Amino acid sequence: MSTTPLHGGAASGFRRMWHDLEALGLEGDSGGYHRFAWTREDHDLREWFAGECADRGLDLTTDRMGNQWAWWGDPDAAVAAGDPGVVIGSHLDSVPNGGAFDGPLGVVGALAAVDQLRHDGFAPARPVGIVNFADEEGARFGVACAGSRVITGALGADRARGLADNDGVTMAEAMRRAGRDPAALGRDDETLARIGAFVELHVEQGRLLVDLGHSVGVGSDIWPHGRWRVDVPGEANHAGTTALAEREDAMLGLAAMIIAARRAAETQGCVATVGKVQVLPGGVNAIASSATGWLDARGSDADAVLRVVTEVRDVVSDFDGLVTQESWTPTTDFDPALVRRIATRLDGLPVIGTGAGHDAGILANAGIRSAMLFVRNPTGVSHSPDEWASADDCLDGIAALADVVTDLAGAGA
Ligand SMILES: [Zn+2]
């Protein structure tokens, strides 16, 4: 990579911040994190972020959803001048028993990148913002990227307020308990107008960079992905007294569906997952009267993903089952000109797609110039304590991010 490595201060600052966060939200001795939106852990993480921003003299604001934005320079003067700022950052929340890197790398990395830029004497020609997006994982209320979806209007305020966690606590109530006003929720054009470009640094959630032999890559797009609910009917009956030939066992259709999804994904070059099922009545000695499975399918080619679903539908129809689409997100392309510019700037870095959703994708869909940088993850594992990146690779990613900001927020841009 041609980018200058981080100087000692930014590197030790990164290590110090990483150390600060290590204990926050740690789940017992599993090594995993529990950092759900609007909980005590989330509060502590937000306070930590505010403190780091205050130490750097950045101006912190929160938007209508409670996403935190810290500015180096005046974002509104830049909007008035028709030349809005460059935003970096990511999120601090986690999935249940999540890894340390998904999210925090982008926030800590953004703070360290600002340290590097200041050390270099960089004078931004347009303001530089750092964002901590709220509720990115959707681990508590079930909708991923809720923070960016609400401010872009992709998730309506009423629907967001009504989402409930496993204890029946609504997002509105959780936000109220966290000291926020849920009535404020909604599309936030003032905040969006301040974002001239957004670049999110993130740990890679696969092994493409390992295979390519690079510590950092530039994101090109987010794969098309969807969720389908598959319902198979059956008839409840006694497990001992009902002859096999007389059964209508919903589980057989569900099992056939799961195997069909796997086979179709293999032939179509996609990925398909059934990670959640619901079986009624749910007794060990009762034949299932209904079986429902949720299919998550993704791939680089939307037609191939939809062919997987068609094959599943064909198999399930033999069991009188029904496939219902719950969500579908087409390919999200990051801004092609921005991607090209970043790839050119970071001469020689590979440009890669990803199967995971991100706030950068939500902003891109809202018409905001967005792109991503990925840091190599040797395990390829994510959403698990095994998610990992070496300190050297993280520092490479931060150096690349600082270089990109130099380009995008510099006088020549
Ligand atoms: Zn993430």
Image (cartoon, rainbow, N blue to C red):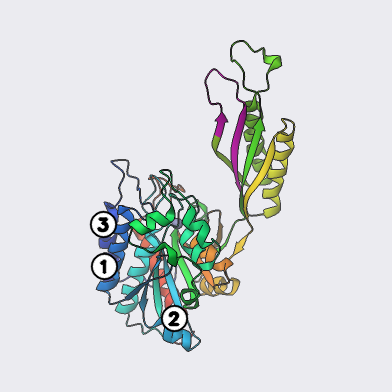
Q: Quadrant of ligand 1?
A: bottom left
**Residue corresponding to mark 1:** 51
Residue 156 % position (x, y): 54, 61
| Residue 34 colored in magenta in the image | no
**CA distance for labels 3 and 1:** 15 Å
Q: Nearer the viewer, residue 317 or 361?
A: 317
Q: Nearer the viewer, residue 68 or 187?
A: 187
Which residues make up the magenta segment? 278-299
Query: What crowding class fits label 2: few (fewer than 14 Cα within 10 Å), some (14-19), or many (20 or more)?
Result: many
Q: Secondary structure at mark 1?
A: helix
**CA distance for labels 2 and 3:** 29 Å
Q: Decide: marks 3, 1 in contact (CB < 8 A)?
A: no
Label 3 vs 1, first from the N-terminus: 3
Label 1 vs 2, first from the N-terminus: 1
Q: Residue at x 41, y 64 (%)?
A: 397
Numbered mark located on residue 19 in the image: 3
One can see residue 322 in this view: yes
Q: Nearer the viewer, residue 165 or 148?
A: 165
| Residue 294 colored in magenta in the image | yes
Q: Is residue 335 above or below residue 160?
A: below
Query: What crowding class fits label 3: few (fewer than 14 Cα within 10 Å), some (14-19), or many (20 or more)?
Result: few
Q: Is residue 240 left or right of residue 243?
A: left
Image quarter for residue 183?
Answer: bottom left
The nearer-to-camera label among 1 and 2 is 1
Q: Residue at x 48, y 54 (%)?
A: 162
Q: Residue at x 26, y 65 (%)?
A: 12
**CA distance for labels 1 and 2:** 24 Å
Numbered mark located on residue 409 in the image: 2
